[in-house]
Image: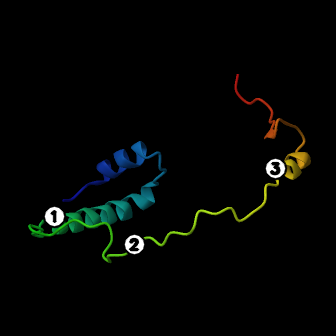
Amino acid sequence: MSINNEDVQKIAHLARLAVGPEELDNYTRNLSQILDLVEQMNEVNTDGVEAMAHPRETKLRLRDDAVTEENQRDKFTGLAPASENGLFLVPKVLD
């Protein structure tokens, strides 16, 4: 699939990217190459191939769910400019 400079300008506009005229040909060529590669990949026969999330059958190693630090909430809220009931108070930013 080949795209032209006009297509790249539209894509850049939608993506809110500033693409200068001197970069346009390079972007067009690179995007066309990417789309050609995707077309090649779509032509590969994947019948009977099971979808997988990872090439290795690994399981996550889980750690024990145990408390490793002591509660320091009072210490940290004491350092804050303003706090109330163990919560940090911040200036209102929205009406």
Look at discs 2 and 1 and give the one toward the viewer. 2
- Left or right of residue 38, residue 94 in this image: right
Which residue matches tag 3? 73
Looking at the picture, which amino acid does disc 2 mark? Lys
Q: What is the spatial separation of the Cα atoms under label 2 and label 1, in whole angstroms? A: 30 Å
Q: Is residue 78 above or below residue 36?
A: above
Q: What is the spatial separation of the Cα atoms under label 2 and label 3, in whole angstroms? A: 35 Å
Which residue matches tag 1? 42
Q: What is the spatial separation of the Cα atoms under label 1 and label 3, in whole angstroms? A: 55 Å
Of the numbered discs 2 and 1, the one sitting upstream in the chain is 1
Image disc number at residue 11? none
- Give the x, y percent position of residue 13: 42, 44
Of the numbered discs 1 and 3, the one sitting upstream in the chain is 1
Asked which quadrant contains residue 48, the reply is bottom left
- Left or right of residue 19, residue 57 in this image: left
Report the number of discs: 3
Badge 3: few (under 14), some or many (20 or more) residues near its Cα, within 10 Å? few
Q: Is residue 44 above or below residue 80?
A: below
Secondary structure type for disc 2: loop
Q: Is residue 54 above or below residue 72?
A: below
Q: Answer yes or no: do the residues labelled 2 and 1 have beta carbons within 8 Å?
A: no
Q: Residue at x 31, y 61 (%)?
A: 31
Looking at the picture, which amino acid does disc 3 mark? Arg
- Give the x, y percent position of residue 90: 80, 36
Foreground pick, 78 / 43: 78
Looking at the picture, which amino acid does disc 1 mark? Asn
